[in-house]
Amino acid sequence: MKKPSGKLFLNYRRDDNSTVTHAIAQSLMLEYQTENVFFDRQKIRPGRLFPKDIDKSLDECAILIVIIGKKWLD
């Protein structure tokens, strides 16, 4: 399978999938390089404007990966 070109963005709920998403993010960063994977805990620095950084990263991503857990609709 051909690797996607462009950046990947992980979307998840921290209180529902944090551990699983962190493991997925680590695997993706190894495969596609850290700078090409948006994982909020590693990409947004303290004091930054969270919504602005999220919007910018979404605009730059080629692939959006949504991690849906049991509490997604709550």
Image (tube, helix red, strand yellow):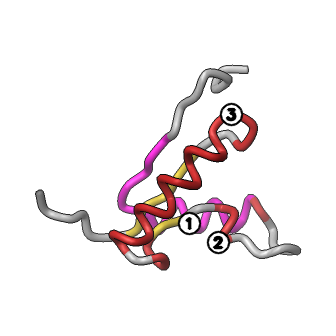
Give me the C-alpha separation between circle 1 and circle 3.
22 Å
| Nearest to viewer (mark 1 / mark 3) | 3
Residue 72 position in % (x across, y down): 64, 26
Residue that appears at 43% across and 51% down: 64
Residue that appears at 21% across and 65% down: 3
Sequence-wise first label, 1 or 2: 2
Q: Which mark is residue 2?
A: none
Residue 15 position in % (x across, y down): 75, 37
Secondary-structure class at tag 1: helix
Tell me where residue 56 sits by quadrant.
bottom right
Give me the C-alpha separation between circle 3 and circle 2.
20 Å
Give me the C-alpha separation between circle 1 and circle 2.
9 Å
| Nearest to viewer (mark 3 / mark 2) | 3
Task: Inspect the image, locate mark 2, and give the three-letter code of the amino acid beneath it.
Answer: Lys
Tell me where residue 63 sits by quadrant.
bottom left
Circle 3 residues within 10 Å: few <14, some 14–19, many ≥20:
some
Task: Inspect the image, locate mark 3, and give the three-letter code of the amino acid beneath it.
Answer: Asp
Residue 48 position in % (x across, y down): 81, 73
Residue 37 appears left or right of 20: left
Tell me where residue 17 sits by quadrant.
top right
Residue 35 is a magenta residue: no
Q: Which mark is residue 43?
A: 2
Task: Inspect the image, locate mark 1, and give the three-letter code of the amino acid beneath it.
Answer: Ser
Residue highlighted by disc 1? 57
Residue highlighted by disc 3? 16
State the quadrant of the C terminus.
top right
Q: What range of the chain is rendered magenta?
A: 51-66
Secondary-structure class at tag 3: helix
**How many numbered marks, from 0 up?**
3
